[in-house]
Image (cartoon, rainbow, N blue to C red):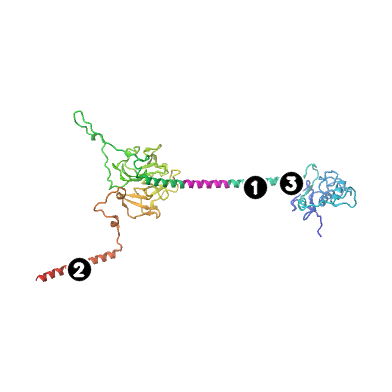
Amino acid sequence: MRASCLVLDKLLQHGDGYKFDGPGQVLAHAFYPGDGRGGDAHFDADETWNYNPDESRGTNFLNVALHELGHSLGLGHSSDSNAVMFPWYQSNEVDNKLPDDDRNGIQELYGSKEKTWGPYKPPPTHTTTTTTTTTMRTLSYKPGFNPSRDPNRERERDLRREREQAARRRAEQERAEQERAEQDQRQRERQRRLEWERERERQNRQRQVQLEREQRERERNKSRERLTTTTTVRPTARPYPNGGHRSQGSHHKPRKPKPDSCMTYYDAISMIRGELFIFRGPFLWRIGANGLYRGYPTETRRHWAALPENFTKVDAVYENKQRQIVFFIGRQYYVFNSVTLAPGYPKPLVSLGLPPTLNHIDASFVWGHNNQTYLTSGTLYWRIDDYTGQVEQDYPRDMSIWSGVGYNIDDAFQYSDGKTYFFKNLGYWEFNDDLMKVAHARAKLSSRKWMQCARSANEVDDEERWTAPLVSGENDSAERSAATREQGISLFLLWLTLFSVTFWRS
């Protein structure tokens, strides 16, 4: 049978969660009655114990053991300084007789053999919760301390403080996690809002194009944003008093020769305010819904007077997403609000992030496939970030991505049908965005489609001119052989006819 109480000498950390502290301070501790360690008493083996009452050196083991065994039996601390259960160590001699306070306490718990005072009260029944809580509470017995200091209360206070600190740490961690979650949520919301704004902008652009396409016919001459066509009236010559007339031509600059509308290549071409503008040298053509305007081609500076007076050609031009008109001429570019030059322009090409060695732009256009702005020059092309207005970081790239177009093009633009067209010399290609290559391998004549020029009498259709034989050269040889046979048969029949006529006449 297991003993109901164990008395053990222990060193420092000894496995019950309440380690000793070496000589001095905590002398011993005990556990209230119960299961497991209940009733056990542990004594600090590092203390100097005195087992002889006659000696004064060291700590009286009997007094301490009697106090701890009182805890093992269920007694708590007493406020009577003469009692064995007083919480602070004293060297009082018990003399084999318990003080009244201790005796009354133990008899209240277990009863007495003889009724010595008052009515008998049965010991209280401890519930499982009280027994468990009381059993695990360790009681320390320390010498030389102020009786007002309760180590058990301090231990409970330390435990409570640790629990509060742990709770604060958990709360701070939860708060930090919540803040991170909220930040991630805000970031996702910003991204969704940005995507939504981009989608709305794309839909607005599509709607605007559709409206312009539907209203172009009836609002061609009424739109406030369209360019106003200027008509120049030749001044009437005023007669001299003597009846003569002053010559008008001698005081004017010689007129520049206008290019042939149906036999010229295009320096630049673009849709501006819903109309088609084609540029060649210092001149331009303007084509509306009803075709080419009268009086064109005319000089470009009649519309955009802020362009350089001595410029020879427009390298590229397009209408940006802010409905501004952007011209590229040499190493500079100009931005116009309708026909008025925007403040701060012109600017050099390097301000767009282009290399300083670049001396011109071949083409500028907004690709209908992704609605992004592109610039080309020679064998390279760049893409413009619409939000920064600068060339994107991973450019330039090789023009070979636009399969079938080749290098050193004259210009490119997006037409009102949403398709992209590339121009070089007298021809053009329609580009297939889905296949990323030209829709027809051979260039078509530009003047036929864009200037509506009539076909000449001896002009052969492209399909007839460029149709290849369906079979290789062997069939060509066979056809030549067949033609030779047919010729021989025809000559034989002619000879036979002549012979028959001659014979009949004779």
Label at residue 489: 2
Q: Which residue is mark 3?
A: 156
Q: Main secondary structure of the magenta part?
A: helix
What residue do we see at 11% from left, 71% from top? 504
**Farthest residue, direction front:** 218
Give x and y (percent) for residue 250: 23, 34
Local SS, label 3: helix
Res 414 visible: no
* Dot 1 or dot 2, earlier in sequence: 1
Local SS, label 1: helix
Quarter of the picture containing the C terminus is bottom left
Residue 186 colored in magenta in the image: yes
Q: Are marks 3 and 2 in contact (CB under 8 Å)?
A: no
Density class for disc 1 (Cα within 10 Å; few <14, some 14-19, many ≥20) is few
Residue 268 colored in magenta in the image: no
Density class for disc 3 (Cα within 10 Å; few <14, some 14-19, many ≥20) is few
Looking at the picture, which amino acid does disc 2 mark?
Ile
Quarter of the picture containing the N terminus is bottom right
Q: CA distance from mark 3 to mark 1?
A: 21 Å
- The span picked out in magenta is 181-198
Label at residue 170: 1
Q: CA distance from mark 1 to mark 2?
A: 110 Å
Looking at the picture, which amino acid does disc 3 mark?
Glu
Looking at the picture, which amino acid does disc 1 mark?
Arg
